[in-house]
Amino acid sequence: MEINSTTKLTDILEAYPWLPDELIKIDSRFKIIKSPVGKIMIKNATIADAVKKTGLEEDVLIEELKKMIVAHEK
C-alpha cells in the first residue's frame, strides 16, 4: 500500500489492524481512533487530516507509519 497525504486512515487501519496501538506511541491524540466517536470521525479522514489534528509534520508521520509497518512484518 502506498501511503501519502491522500491515503485514507480507514484503508490503512483495515490493512494494518494493529496500527492504532502503535500510533498512540507517536502522539497520544491518536487514542481517539480506538473510541466509537473516533471510528466515525475517521471514515473519510486522510493522512493530511491527521496531520492537521496532531500538528505532526506530514513527512514525519508517513515515515513513522512506514517504519512501524516494516518492523511489524519482520
Image (cartoon, helix red, strand yellow):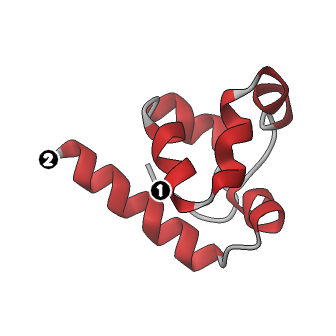
Which image quarter: residue 9? top right
Q: For the point 52% across and 67% down, which residue is it?
A: 62
Left-right relation of 37 to 18 = right
| Residue that carries the numbered disc 1 in the rendered image | 2
User: Is residue 8 in sight in this rendering?
Assistant: no
**Tag 1 or tag 2, which sits nearer the N-term?**
1
Q: Position of residue 32 (x, y in %)?
A: 74, 38
Please state which of residues 44 and 71 is positioned toward the viewer in this rendering.
Answer: 71
Front residue of 50/30: it is 30
Q: Residues within 10 Å of mark 2 (few under 14, many from 20)?
A: few
In the displayed structure, 54 sits above or below 45; it is below
> For the residue marked with disc 1, what is the amino acid?
Glu
Q: In the rendered image, which residue does mark 2 sit on?
A: 74
Q: Which mark's residue is nearer the viewer, 2 or 1?
A: 2
Q: Which mark is residue 60?
A: none
The location of residue 7, given as percent across then percent down, is: 64, 52
Q: Nearer the viewer, residue 47 or 18?
A: 18
Rounded to the nearest angstrom, the CA distance separating label 2 from label 1 is 19 Å
Residue 14: image location, x then y, percent: 53, 29
Kind of residue at badge 2: Lys
Q: Is residue 41 visible?
A: yes
> Which SS class for mark 1?
loop
User: In the picture provided, is 34 more to the left or to the right than 63?
Assistant: right
